[in-house]
Image: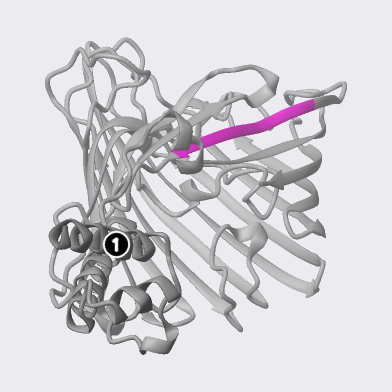
Amino acid sequence: MITRHRGAAFLTVLTLITLGTPGLFLPGAQAAERDPLVKLLIKKGVITEGEVREMEGELAEEQAKEAAKKVLEAKPSTEKPRIELPNALSKLKMKGRWAAGFFKSQEAGSFPEGSFEVPEAKLQFAFQPDDTYTIIMRGNFNNATFNNLDYFYLDAKDPFKLPKSWPLTLDARFGRFKLALGEETWSNNPVESALPSNSASNVAGSDEGLQFSGKLGKGWSALNWSAAVSNGTTGTGSDTTQAKAFTGSLGINPISPLALSASFHTTGSLKQQAAEVGVAGLTGRPGSATNWRRTVWELDGRWDFKKGKTLNPPAYTDSQAYLRGAFGAFNDDVTGAAEREGDYGFIEGLVNVFPKVYLAARYSRVDLDSKQTASLNSVTANYYERYSLGGGYRWSPNTILKAEYSVNQEDQVTGGDPKDDLLALVIASQF
């Protein structure tokens, strides 16, 4: 009978503890704090004070273990979540640029009657699944028509995780991307350029390939470098030639206001295909050549007066003024036709006369050797030069109203100078 009473007493005390009776959750609780029923059981000798304290201690220990387990389970994981449909949009970024305006040329130009145009429209998507890799895709909607994907590549930021103490950084790019040839190539559009037009040469091109880039050294003598191997032939899709193109560049900032760079591009054998890199609109083979290759080199320099934080693009610079220039040469080595070669260059300046107003000017030229002719900017000539003067009004931080008048002069060898000067009024915006 006593054993049965003691078993019932233990069950009673355990039930009271489980239900949360005050005083029984704390080990070593005072007798006055206990439930009256527990006090009565102790007084009658059914259960001892020591047994009650022992039960309180065991319960407290179990509760502590359970609380610690919950804390560990609630601790956030250091592993990054997998990219799935519910959180994919958080990794997607979008940006773009757009320009539209009115263009009026003389009778021999492209817009003798005047025309409203949308010369620039780009929309770019960047999907970043982690801190290292980003997939870039950019659509070209120039003239309000989808033309192509001029960018579609994978960007890898420090993919090999080089030690921070090394005097070398290394990034990679794989897919279709803009080739790092010259400095104007990064702003050769009506939105980012200081003027709606480009220089007469407008050396630029995008291609499919693999590029490595980074910085070599530290301090003022550090070199910015890039090296790319690509198809070399125009258009997208598979490449039908065996020889690949190479593009390399080096840049240095010996003092804060001065930026210097040099770049080089060679295509290898192009057979009868067109080249990706154009010079003054020239991308096709010379004459009836059965095989050809193109080589281009360029030297660039820029000096910023009262240099601001934004060095490029030119139209959005917050320096007081800048002066930049380039000089380069190209050679089209051919089989079955005459060789084509020449040099080119430009000088450009911008002055921020007021916080919202700037003035800009550019002189540029292309000169073919030995009186040879080619279709330079759609005009068959031996020599082509452009004088451009204009400015911009910063309507908002991302929108600029631009105006320009360009005087174009050509040496056609066998003909006179065509009348093709151009007036351009443009609204340009980036977002």
Identified at 27% across, 12% down, the residue is: 272
In percent of width and height, residue 184 lies at 49, 51
Up-down relation of residue 38 to residue 420 (above or below):
below
In percent of width and height, residue 374 lies at 47, 25
Instruction: Give the SS element for disc 1.
Output: helix
**416 or 171: which is nearer to us?**
171
Colour scheme: one colour
Identified at 13% across, 70% down, the residue is: 163
**130 or 398: which is nearer to us?**
130
Whether residue 373 can be seen here: no
In percent of width and height, residue 344 lies at 45, 47
Q: Amino acid at mark 1?
A: Leu
Magenta stretch: give its range: 117-126
Residue, disc 1: 14
In the image: residue 24, left or right of residue 354: left
- Number of callouts: 1
Chief secondary structure of the magenta portion: strand
Identified at 65% across, 72% down, the residue is: 318
